[in-house]
Amino acid sequence: MKTIDKLPGNLPKGEKRIEKTFQDCMKEERKLIRTRTFVKTSKKFYRTYVNSAKKALNTAKILLDNEAYEWSIVPAYSAIYQSANAIIVKELGKECRDHFCLLITLLKLKKIGFDELKNIESLRSRLDLLKEEELAFANKIRLVRSTVIYRPSEKFDEKKIAEYVFKKAQNFVNKVIEVLE
C-alpha cells in the first residue's frame, strides 16, 4: 500500500549493522522508563504469546467489522508483536519488551544466528518463511500504530489501510505459527 510503503524504514541492513544494533539493544541503550529490554522467561510460555496474538487478531477483526478502522491497526500490530515475541521466548527464553529491538533480534536470528543455539540452522531455515519485507512492514506498522495512538489523522483512507494492515498481520502471525511448529 503506497501510504505505508512511503514511510521511512529504520531497520538496519547488512549483518554488521544488524549485529551492532542488536548489541545496542543488549546494552539496553534503548531503555524505556527503566524497563529492561530483555527479561528471562520460561521457554514454555511461548504459547501464551501465540494465543495473545490470535486474540489480538480477533479484536482487530471486530474493530474492522464495526468500522473502527483507525483503532483496528493497534491490535493488528499487537498480534505481530506478540507472535514475534513467541519466537524469541521459545528460542532464547527471553521476552523482548522493546518493539524495535524485537524486530532486530528476529533479524539477527534470521541472518546471523546465535552461537548458543544448537538448532540455529533449523531455526534459520524456518525463519525463511518470514521475509525481510515482512519484518520491514512490521516495523512500519509499529510506527503507524504510534501515529494512530498519538496523532490521529483524517487524511488517510482508514478503511483501506486498516484492511491492508489486518491482512498483513494475519499473514505474519500465520507464518510465525509455522516457524514455531
Image (tube, rainbow, N blue to C red):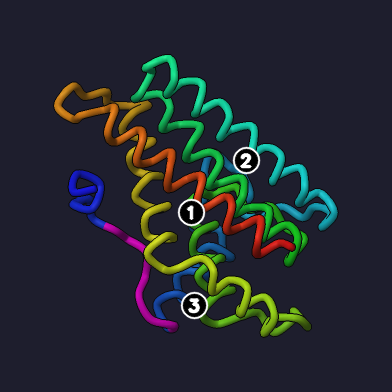
Rendering coords of residue 81 (x, y %): 55, 46
Query: Element type at marker 3?
Result: helix
- The dot on residue 19 is 3
| Residue on which the image places disc 2 | 53
**Which SS does the magenta portion mostly show?**
loop
**Residue occupying the point 51% across, 53% down:** 172
Q: Do the residues labelled 2 and 3 touch (CB within 8 Å)?
A: no
Distance between mark 2 and mark 3 Cα atoms: 27 Å
Name the residue type under label 3.
Glu
**Residue occupying the point 55% across, 82% down:** 112
Residues 38 and 78: in front is: 78
Question: N-terminal of the two: label 3 or label 1?
Answer: 3
Query: Element type at marker 1?
Result: loop
* Residue 91, picture quadrant: bottom right
How many C-alpha atoms fall within 10 Å of the one at disc 3: few (<14), some, or many (≥20)? many
Q: Quadrant of the C terminus?
A: bottom right
Q: Are marks 3 and 1 in contact (CB under 8 Å)?
A: no
Question: N-terminal of the two: label 2 or label 1?
Answer: 1
Name the residue type under label 1.
Arg
Question: N-terminal of the two: label 2 or label 3?
Answer: 3
Name the residue type under label 2.
Ala
| Residue on which the image places disc 1 | 30
Query: What segment is highlighted magenta in the picture?
Result: 9-15
Rendering coords of residue 94 (x, y %): 72, 57
